[in-house]
Amino acid sequence: MRIEPKNAALGATIHDIDLSQPLDESRFRAIEQALGRYGVLSFPSQTWTTAQQRAFAQRFGQLEINVANTSQDNEFPDVMILSNMVEKGRPLGLNDAGQDWHTDMSYSRTIAFSNVLYGIRIPMRDGQPLGNTEFCNMHAAYTDLPQALKDELDGMTITHDFNKFWEKMRSQPGSRRAPLTEEQRRRKPPVSHPVFLRHPITGRKVLYANPGYSVRINELPEARSEEVLAFLFEHQLQDKYRYQHRWTEGDVLMWDNMGTIHNAVADYRPDEPRYIRRCQVMADRYFPELY
Ligand code: SIN
């Protein structure tokens, strides 16, 4: 297995590994370390069944069944389909997943460790891939914060709410999303997490805020909370922290949800098919070390 860094804010390509084969302990550890260090890992030219994808992802933690309960794989409810494809009038997957900056599952008591995506159909136009996935580096975003703000926010917490992002996506023209039911809201109530987390792999602090789900810095007066959140959202999206994964069919893409935030670029049309299988790995293995 060979790790090729992207020479960018984030990202590495992992060569010479067949992910359809069971992962031995030394490779598992090497991938885990690389994920902490580079934030986003791509494994090109993979061939995966859904069961093989689940087996790989489950090495890193439990898989989450999304509370919205839409767009699940027919056989495995903990596998989600991201797709704009429609067959016989039936959507094959969620067609607008992640189309703004966010961190998966910051709205959950047990947060996400990683996402494991497998690119099966990638839209292309004029020889270029569409629907790329962008990331920002939250280790670097923390490091660069003004010291006075680090001191002010140290020990404070942020409330994250699943409904914030859901409603934002619902307000987009043509959205197929229904409002969350009372039951769905009850199962995912807003939760609080520290503004700064100590990353369980790197041991370094990261900024754990994101425009998608973060709604309030709990220990600050409301006006100051809004001012600081607006600053953090702008700060964390600077170009110097960004990396964009350009998809190729057969790519496995895995990212660290504590050390990055991400955005699925919505630059393709309904007649340009995209089909990606997604597993959401929770941080249950790492959680005790987080706080
Ligand atoms: C997501 O998990 O946020 C979606 C990523 C993508 O479709 O590129």
Image (tube, rainbow, N blue to C red):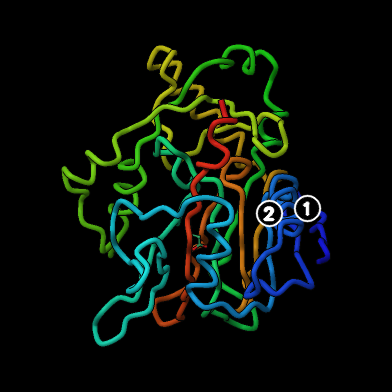
Instruction: Give coordinates of residue 221: x percent, y percent.
Output: 40, 12
Instruction: Give coordinates of residue 239: x percent, y percent.
Output: 68, 46
| Label placed on residue 8 | 1
Examine the rendered structure and indicate whether residue 61 appears above or below residue 90. Answer: above
- Seen at 43% across and 13% down, the residue is 219
Mark 2 Cα shell of 10 Å, populated few (<14), some (14-19), many (≥20): many
- Camera-side residue of 252 and 273: 252
| Horizontal relation, residue 284 to residue 78: left or right | right
Instruction: Give coordinates of residue 145: x percent, y percent.
Output: 67, 25
| Horizontal relation, residue 113 to residue 105: left or right | right
Q: Quadrant of the C terminus?
A: top right
SS at circle 1: loop
Instruction: Give coordinates of residue 53: x percent, y percent.
Output: 54, 69
Identify which amino acid the numbered label 2 is placed on: Tyr
- Camera-side residue of 236 and 81: 81
- View extreme (left): residue: 182
| Horizontal relation, residue 211 to residue 235: left or right | left
Q: Earlier in the sequence, mark 1 or mark 2?
A: 1
Do the numbered discs 1 and 2 sit on residues whose CB atoms are within 8 Å?
A: yes
Q: Quadrant of residue 21?
A: bottom right
- Camera-side residue of 177 and 50: 50
SS at circle 2: strand
Q: Quadrant of residue 253?
A: bottom right
Q: Is the shortest distance between ligand 1 and the CB of mark 1 under 8 Å? A: no
| Label placed on residue 243 | 2
